[in-house]
């Protein structure tokens, strides 16, 4: 299968506004032109000092997110982020700060990711180049189960193993939720009804069960509310009794490792959740990607005259 093209289409094709932002960022990172230009010609180092303007603060999301841990690591690893900090509160608060900054054309640095509607709502957002590759490039979202699930519950294991969809599927649900204010879970339910061809492939060859309980751990972001909800709907078609519990990323991994939960479809790998994965990888089963083409990184409005994390000045 022409997977490279498929991936490019996934990222670039359907939500064109999102694609502009995402591809702009990707291109910069892969080709590395921005970094080189900035480094080669010393005179362009008159980049504006945004550090002071943003109070040497990156506006982040919940402390329990992988991207928050990664941002703390970035602050440690980038010498030029000496004396910076990340303000960890909530996704809603970050989005409100972003909107306010954009309304006033003020500088702001947020922790951004795809899939998310932020790039559709604010098409001029751009990822900053990340020469130390702290945030990684394109990522996947993997399905993980606890040890022993395959033996205890082969039918559930089979659905989990067959579950796979695409960035635009997830985005359709997320975007509709952000536009209408309707619950992600309700939209996901309709998505399953409207996309039975895809859903059939997840439950293909799976025997019906009678109310077998399955505990899915997830995270509270819309992307994972969407994936866990479509999986729940699909499994319930086969007679499973599915509970989805949103928790911090650390708890997702811990509860699989201890066997308190059966599975998750919310592991952003290999980068975003690396720290948790590495800690628990021997205590869980990794079924590989259920979605490919995600991304995280420091993100700014395009009116900021800056291309790379290295263009930021230290706080001293
Ligand atoms: N996110 C969205 C999550 C995973 C889903 C990037 C905010 C994180 O752990 O950072």
Image (cartoon, rainbow, N blue to C red):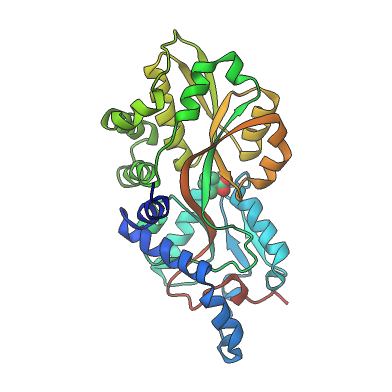
**In this orientation, which residue lies closer to the viewer: 259 or 298?**
259
Q: Residue furthest left?
A: 194
Measuring 52% from the left and 67% from the top, which residue is drawn there? 30
Measuring 38% from the left and 44% from the top, which residue is drawn there? 174
Q: Is residue 291 left or right of residue 132?
A: left
> Residue 238's image quarter?
top left
Q: Quadrant of the C terminus?
A: bottom right
**In this orientation, which residue lies closer to the viewer: 2 or 109?**
2
Q: Is residue 110 visible?
A: yes
**Callout count:** 0
Q: Residue furthest top?
A: 210
Residue 260, compared with residue 64, is above or below; it is above
Residue 181, compared with residue 120, is above or below; it is above
Residue 16, compared with residue 201, is above or below; it is below
Q: Residue furthest front?
A: 1
Residue 151 x %, y %: 60, 16
Residue 259 x %, y %: 66, 22
Q: Is residue 48 visible?
A: no
**In this orientation, which residue lies closer to the viewer: 35 or 90?**
35
Residue 170 x %, y %: 39, 42
Measuring 65% from the left and 34% from the top, which residue is drawn there? 253
**In this orientation, which residue lies closer to the viewer: 240 or 203?**
203
Residue 144 x %, y %: 58, 32
């Amino acid at each position: 299968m022409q997977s490279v093209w498929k991936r490019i289409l996934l990222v670039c094709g359907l939500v064109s506004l999102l694609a502009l932002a995402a591809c702009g960022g990707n291109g910069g990172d892969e080709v590395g032109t921005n970094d080189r230009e900035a480094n080669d010609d010393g005179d362009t180092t008159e980049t504006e000092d945004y550090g002071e303007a943003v109070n040497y603060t990156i506006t982040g999301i919940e402390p329990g997110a992988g991207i928050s841990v990664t941002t703390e690591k970035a602050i440690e690893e980038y010498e030029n982020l000496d004396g910076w900090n990340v303000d960890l509160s909530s996704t809603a608060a970050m989005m409100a700060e972003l909107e306010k900054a954009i309304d006033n054309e003020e500088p702001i640095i947020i922790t951004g990711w795809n899939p998310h509607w932020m790039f559709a709502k604010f098409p001029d957002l751009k990822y900053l180049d990340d020469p130390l590759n702290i945030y990684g490039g394109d990522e996947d979202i993997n399905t993980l189960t606890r040890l022993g699930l395959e033996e205890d519950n082969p039918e559930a294991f089979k659905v989990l193993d067959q579950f796979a969809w695409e960035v635009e599927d997830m985005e359709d649900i997320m975007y509709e939720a952000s536009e209408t204010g309707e619950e992600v879970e309700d939209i996901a339910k309709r998505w399953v009804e409207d996309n039975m061809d895809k859903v059939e492939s997840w439950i293909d060859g799976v025997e019906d069960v009678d109310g077998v309980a399955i505990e899915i751990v997830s995270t509270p972001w819309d992307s994972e509310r969407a994936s866990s909800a479509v999986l729940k709907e699909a499994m319930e078609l086969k007679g499973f009794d599915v509970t989805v519990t949103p928790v911090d990323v650390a708890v997702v991994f811990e509860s699989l490792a201890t066997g308190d939960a059966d599975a998750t479809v919310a592991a952003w790998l290999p980068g975003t959740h690396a720290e948790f994965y590495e800690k628990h990888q021997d205590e869980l089963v990794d079924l590989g990607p259920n979605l490919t083409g995600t991304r995280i990184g420091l993100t700014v409005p395009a009116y900021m005259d800056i291309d790379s994390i290295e263009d930021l000045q230290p706080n001293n």
